Amino acid sequence: MALSGKVAVVTGGAMGIGRAITETLLQSGATVVLLDVNESAAKSLLDDLHKVYGRDRTLFLSCTVESEEQVKAALQKTVDTFGGIDILCNNAGILNEGEWEKTVSINLLGVIRGTYVALQHMNKLTGGRGGVVINTASMAGLGPLLSCPVYTASKHGVVGFTRAMAAASKASDYGIRFNAVCPGFVQTDLISNTKLKLGQFSHLEDATNQLMAEMRMLAPSEVAACVLELATDETKNGEALMVFAQGKQYVTFPTL
Ligand SMILES: NC(=O)C1=CN([C@@H]2O[C@H](COP(=O)(O)OP(=O)(O)OC[C@H]3O[C@@H](n4cnc5c(N)ncnc54)[C@H](O)[C@@H]3O)[C@@H](O)[C@H]2O)C=CC1
Ligand SMILES: CCCCCC(=O)/C=C/C=C\C=C\C=C\[C@@H](O)[C@@H](O)CCCC(=O)O
């Protein structure tokens, strides 16, 4: 299988897109460590996964991506347990325009933190074996969602950070590829009760619901399939892969 022998870490791996990524990577032969704050969801998922994949290829570690200490401990435990890290999926994210600092802290700072801590373990220049980092951005990382400006900013930041890290890694010979997956609307808890999550922009919910209807919904598994493509296609570095209900498309960015 494409990922046999590989060790993957998935943040926000207990639910939604992260759960689908976890399952897809396991199906492809990887060992998967899922980091999440929702212990009940994670433990329920692990029970299901153990029945299908056995107990030796999955591990759940309670960890918030907001904590440097917890991320460092989780990634060290991963290396101590499975010998290294080959794939990092910085997937954890929230929608909360009312608590916008928390949105930035998780969606952007959490991606930066996970990347920088994993770099110490994955970088070929510091004893790592290289690999790939796939960041879950969004279509809102490529164009504005008027009802959630801070969420939009966080996802634009993820796209920019990913592309810059890809260039830095290539120039520095880290041996690590960096890519972003940019889904449209996906049927998960994140987009439930959006009116409560839009803060001062809740009056714009209808406009977003109209966009949601036009773009149609994706299943988490469709996003996970694109993550698998970015993980396994070693020609992909610095890419942003858009995922629509109608298909997928790599972004062509302007050459400045
Ligand atoms: N649902 C959608 O329409 C889209 C979602 N995305 C992005 O996909 C990613 C996953 O979102 P969904 O699966 O939709 O949401 P979800 O709410 O179903 O799952 C998010 C997971 O992240 C975990 N999480 C939240 N805060 C955390 C933290 N501080 N540390 C560790 N784990 C944490 C949650 O417990 C949950 O298991 C997010 O980055 C989101 O922005 C991108 C485009 C579309
Ligand atoms: C309600 C928040 C959803 C959070 C989950 C998520 O990330 C979903 C994203 C789905 C689609 C985003 C599409 C963005 C489209 C806009 O950029 C586009 O309609 C802008 C139109 C032209 C303009 O520049 O105003």
Image (cartoon, rainbow, N blue to C red):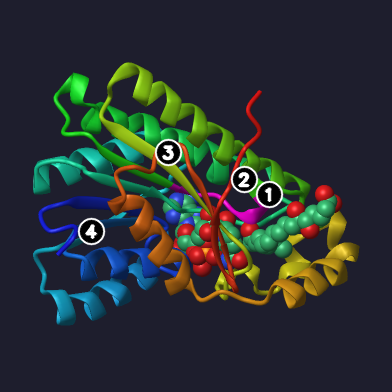
In three-dimensional space, the C-alpha distance between marks 1 and 2, rounded to whole angstroms, equals 6 Å
Q: Amino acid at mark 3?
A: Ser
Q: Mark 2 highlights which residue? A: 155
Is the CB of the residue bearing disc 2 within 8 angstroms of ligand 2? Answer: yes
Under tag 1, what secondary structure? helix
Q: Mark 1 highlights which residue? A: 151
In three-dimensional space, the C-alpha distance between marks 3 and 1, rounded to whole angstroms, equals 20 Å
In three-dimensional space, the C-alpha distance between marks 2 and 4, rounded to whole angstroms, equals 25 Å
Marks 3/2 in contact by CB < 8 Å: the verdict is no
Q: Which residues are magenta?
A: 135-140
In three-dimensional space, the C-alpha distance between marks 4 and 1, rounded to whole angstroms, equals 28 Å
How many neighbours does mark 4 have within 10 angstroms: few (below 14), some (14-19), or many (20 or more)?
many
Q: Mark 4 highlights which residue? A: 32
Residue 64 x/y as whole percent: 42, 48
Q: Amino acid at mark 2?
A: Lys
Q: Is residue 243 above or below residue 177?
A: below
